[in-house]
């Protein structure tokens, strides 16, 4: 008896990264080296910028240009993912609060749109920036992560995090969410 498929999943063995050149957000979980977990309709990826320890992106697995285009099932699963992810981020590293931002701006910029234009037109993909906020500096993986604008809007900055620390962040988040490896 197989039973129900676990909701929050990740691959036990990561394959070689093959990011989708047309829309990086459309990269399937099995080809995304920074995948934290995925569901049928959503994926959570560790953000390239770890200026806020545990910054992640929550994106639809299919290419959806606007929140208004989500199916009822995707909306329900979005709520389920947020209900698990927000407290997991608070527990994982002691975040005081979580900021969430839905931004499509980069898809419309003239220089280096992200994702790239498709047929000469903006090609936005629904995704949320989920950012843990910290009242005090956090020590993790031999690094110190601070939040100099705590209590104010988050300001992105370039913070280089070694691959082994990125993996440790992903593993900590997977544990807190209760991810099942496939």
Image: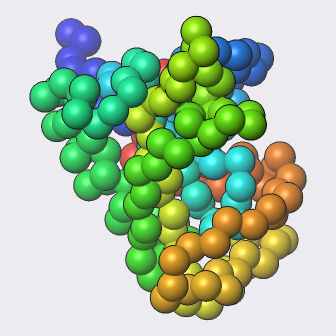
| Residue 39, horizontal then vertical, whole percent | 36, 29
| Residue 174, horizontal then vertical, whole percent | 51, 47
Count of numbered labels shown in the rendering: 0
152 left or right, relative to 62: right
Camera sees residue 27? no
- The scheme the figure's colours follow is rainbow
Residue displayed at 61% across by 46% down? 46
Residue 158, quarter of picture: bottom right
| Residue 159, horizontal then vertical, whole percent | 81, 63
Which image quarter holds the N terminus?
A: top left
Residue displayed at 63% across by 33% down? 114
Q: Which residue is outermost to the left?
A: 72
Residue 7, quarter of picture: top left
> Height in image: 78 above or below 102?
above
63 left or right, relative to 106: left
Residue displayed at 22% across by 46% down? 79
> Height in image: 40 above or below 44?
above
Camera sees residue 108? yes
> Height in image: 171 above or below 152?
above
Residue displayed at 70% across by 81% down? 146
| Residue 88, horizontal then vertical, whole percent | 41, 61
């Amino acid at each position: 008896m197989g039973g129900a498929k676990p909701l929050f999943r990740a691959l036990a063995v990561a394959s070689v990264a093959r990011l989708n050149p047309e829309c990086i957000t459309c990269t399937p979980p099995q080809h995304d080296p920074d995948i934290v977990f995925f569901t049928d309709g959503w994926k959570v990826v560790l953000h390239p910028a770890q200026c806020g320890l545990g910054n992640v992106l929550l994106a639809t697995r299919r290419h959806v240009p606007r929140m208004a285009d989500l199916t009822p099932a995707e909306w329900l699963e979005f709520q389920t993912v947020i209900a698990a992810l927000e407290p997991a981020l608070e527990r994982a590293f002691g975040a005081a609060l979580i900021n969430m931002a839905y931004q499509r701006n980069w898809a419309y910029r003239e220089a280096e749109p992200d994702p790239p234009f498709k047929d000469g037109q903006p090609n936005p993909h629904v995704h949320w920036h989920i950012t843990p906020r910290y009242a005090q500096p956090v020590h993790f993986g031999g690094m110190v992560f601070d939040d100099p604008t705590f209590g104010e809007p988050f300001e992105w900055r370039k913070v280089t995090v070694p691959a082994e620390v990125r993996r440790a962040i992903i593993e900590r988040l997977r544990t807190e969410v209760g991810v099942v490896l496939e």
